[in-house]
Amino acid sequence: MIELSKKLLRIVGQTNAKYKMFEENDKILLALSGGKDSMSLAHTLKHFCSVSPLNWSFKAVTIGYGIGENFAPIKEHFKEHEIDYEVIETKIFEFGQEKIRTNTTFCSFCSRMRRGYLYTYALENGFNKIAIAHHLDDAAESFFMNFTYNGALRTLAPKYTAQNGLVVIRPLILARERQIRDFAQKNELPIMNEEEACPAKQYGGKEPFARADTKAILVDLELKNPKFFVSLKSAFGNIHSDTFFANSTQDYNDDE
């Protein structure tokens, strides 16, 4: 029996009300990695689907990388809880070994390949939305990494339409990672460990440092200001675009 977190459900409910995550006749494909975030989102989607006055459905899909992953515990768990689930077996790891140069990261290549398989499956099987289990901590990390390393002010949108017409939604985007972790641990969800689920760990190439460094910075900022994430969440929806440098001919008052 899954014990749903009332606080987590309230946050997702507020996110749905604000961004219209779940709509009439939606057919949603959940990108399930097997980690705590996507496993928690699967049960959250099941709850909202069962209580929603609207007619919509979802299915969870995992992209296998061809590294000998054991998906049996997840398959058994979802069968027990009546969640539609499928594993798409691929040769991403094999392809990566052929294409990735020595001492480079596997992550960006893996991400592009995984997204391609997901989009193809969704389009071929009549899905109109893809659900991803990113949370507020992910959005914060993305924001800091982009302006620190990429020279851009951007983060993870709660909802957007991809070029192929699929709508990508992030129902957990306003939730904190610790809330999701608590839910997964309390319900003893079958979580795939990183060594088993991540091709980069088996590839043996250069591991990315930017995310780890950014996580450490965010931990320090929150220690110094306990309301840091509250302020950051508010800032993500309070953009003063006229005070930036995107258009040099724009007039604005920087004395405010």
Image (tube, grey):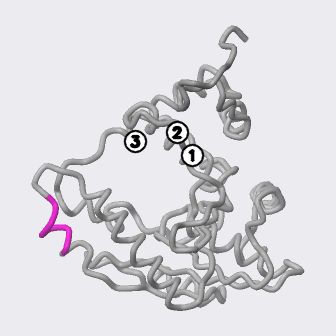
Question: Could you tell which of marks 2 and 3 lies nearer the N-terminus?
Answer: 2
The residue that appears at 52% across and 25% down in the rendered structure is: 220
Look at label 3 and name its amino acid: Arg
In front: 99, or 41? 99
Label 2 to label 3: alpha-carbon separation: 11 Å
Residue 39 percent coordinates (x, y): 57, 70
Identify the disc placed on residue 139: 1
Work out whether 5 lies above or below 241.
below
- Name the quadrant containing residue 243: top right
The residue that appears at 28% across and 65% down in the rendered structure is: 199
Mark whose residue sits in front, 2 or 3:
2
The residue carrying pointer 2 sits among few (fewer than 14), some (14 to 19) or many (20 or more) residues within 10 Å by Cα, namely some
Identify the disc placed on residue 211: 3
Q: Quadrant of the N terminus?
A: bottom right
- Name the quadrant containing residue 120: bottom left
Q: Residue furthest front?
A: 249
Q: Quadrant of the C terminus?
A: top right
The residue that appears at 56% across and 40% down in the rendered structure is: 140
Residue 97 is covered by the magenta coloring: yes
Q: Are marks 1 and 2 in contact (CB under 8 Å)?
A: yes
Residue 3 lies left or right of residue 204; in this view the side is right
Q: Which residues are magenta?
A: 95-100
Look at label 2 and name its amino acid: Phe
Work out whether 113 lies above or below 208.
below
Q: Which residue is mark 2?
A: 143
